[in-house]
Image (cartoon, helix red, strand yellow):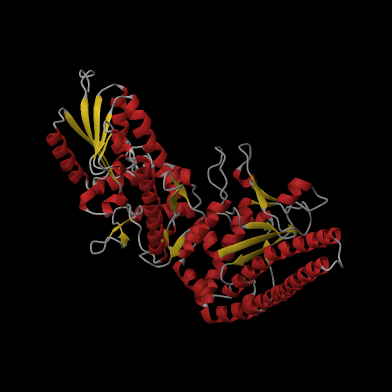
Amino acid sequence: MAGQENQQYTVLYGRLSQEDERAGESNSIQHQRTLLEKYAKEKGFENTIFLADDGYSGTNFERPSWKKIVEMIEAGQVANLIVKDASRLGREYLQVGYYMEIYFPQKNVRFIAVNDGVDSTVESSNDFNPIRNWANELHAKDTSRKVRAVMKMKAEQGERLGGRPPYGYRKSDGDANTLVPDEDTAPVVKRIFSLCAAGNGPKRIATILTKEQVVNPSNAYYRKTGKSHRGLDTTRPCLWSSNSVTSILNNEVYLGHSVGLRTTTISYKNKQRVERPESERFVVKNTHEALVTQEQWDIVQEVRQHKKRVPKHMDEPNIFSGLVFCADCGKPLVLHRASTMKKAEYNFKCYTYGKKGKTVCTPHHIREFELKAVVLEDLRRVTHFARMKEKQFAAYISSKNTLELRREMNTIQKDLDTMRRRREELSKLFKRLYEDNVLGRVTDEQYRMLAGDYTVEQKALEEQIPEKEARLEKLKAASANVNTFVEKAKQYTAIDELTPELLRLFIQRIEVGERTEKYSRSSHQSIRIVYRDIGTVDSAMEQGEAQPRIAPPLSEVFHQLPA
């Protein structure tokens, strides 16, 4: 209103929320404007302007047009404020009451709510304002409760809850509630997962995509639909952030699942969105086409779990991160690299040895290139046999793994039976202890002491039993799946080098033993490789012998390495 600071206006204000929009045309912004302009003309109000907030809740006053009106009021530019009804001003009982009873009178602003018959210049018309405002807030609260219930029901059924489709998808032409891969962005999502599986973290992936000038999610949606939204920066359309990459890597929607109620508002008054706990979300599986396989998803989550920041002087991340362990103490082997070391000197050492010294464990020292050479050779050997002698391979794995799994499952089942019996005993003991206390057989002091002990034991059981049950189910599901391994082996007929993705695709765990002669670079060292789906594979499996993998002397390893 530059140059017109002393001019006063009659402001016609309209507001429409998503809930109001569902109520029908009578609440539309256009309908409100028509009604208010007609009223102003009939009542002789001049110098009118219409301002509206379309799509804003009445439970708070963080609305752009309303803020503009307040600025005008503070500048003395508003003589009259007219709304369709008091609920258009807002539905927050205390705040609306403050504006109507205190703020407008202080600023000499005449307030009119047409359909409610409210006119601040007519004292009797204000008598029911507190009751009316309270009812409007109750309406907002009730509407919010109903909307949440509907959203929950839709989430349980796997329906989309509106909003823009996740990056990598678009709405189906025939059904707006169905997601289909987007031809332009789906390949980017697949590449993000592949880059992460190869050992790249979100920050590194964001740098790669930015350097390659790949349009980021917010700008890709804007270019396709023309719709703007929070966070859109059209001046830097190809700038990716690690947060955007992390959000994609965490989203189960790319597995083909619908994830409902991932976020919520703090309350019906506070519309700030917050993340829901995973336990409160609804996941309905296989509702649309997946962009990544479950196998690749698991690999990515595992890579990210063990991902550590790579020092600036290092060329690449530790591809064995989270896979290599000490055969004696079970703790991870730590990779030691420094700018002063040559690559051939990079080495793994036992974490326990490094922290507590030789009285607890030994170094289990092995150089990185040695481990790579041994694992690569063994992976080639096992996948070759899986492809070339499929029946013999399957028979061997099945007989070996069946015995190992049965032993562990029997042990866990016995533990579970014992723990469940003890849990039942504790329940009976609690009941008997309570009865004895009531009857005076046990003093209050004795009751508190015994009850405390029982509670601690019961709590421990409640934590341990689910863990044991989960482990048992995992073992049952992990029964030798030779076919899965063979199919993977057929896909990789030529394995030239190890990558993080390849390692986690085939290998579950690597255990490194101590050398037969400590600190000797010429002695042998046992290495146990546990493969996914099939467990361990002895080096002499064709003859049925049990023999662990051996890390050869350094001279042999150097001989095996490419020039």
* Residue 104 occupies quadrant: top left
Q: Give the residue displayed 85% in from the left and 66% down from the top.
A: 440
Residue 223, how many percent across, how many down? 25, 45
Where is residue 258, by image quadrant?
Answer: bottom left
Residue 473 visible, this orientation: yes
Q: In front here: 100 or 59?
A: 100
Q: Which of 434 and 255 is in front in this view?
A: 434
Q: Position of residue 188 (x, y in %)?
A: 36, 52
Residue 409 appears left or right of 561: right
| Picture coordinates of residue 505, whole percent (x, y) | 52, 63
Give the residue at x 61% y 60%: 374
Q: Residue furthest front?
A: 124
Considering the image in quadrants, where does the N terminus appear?
Answer: top left
* In the foreground, 265 or 362: 265
**What residue is drawn where x is 63% and y is 54%?**
370
Count of labels in the image: 0
Seen at 21% across and 50% down, the residue is 26
Residue 235 seen: no
Q: Give coordinates of residue 179: x percent, y percent.
A: 32, 61
Residue 116 is left or right of residue 193, and the answer is left
Nearer the observer, 30 or 255: 30
In the displayed structure, would residue 475 be above or below residue 82?
below
Quadrant of the rendered image containing residue 260: bottom left
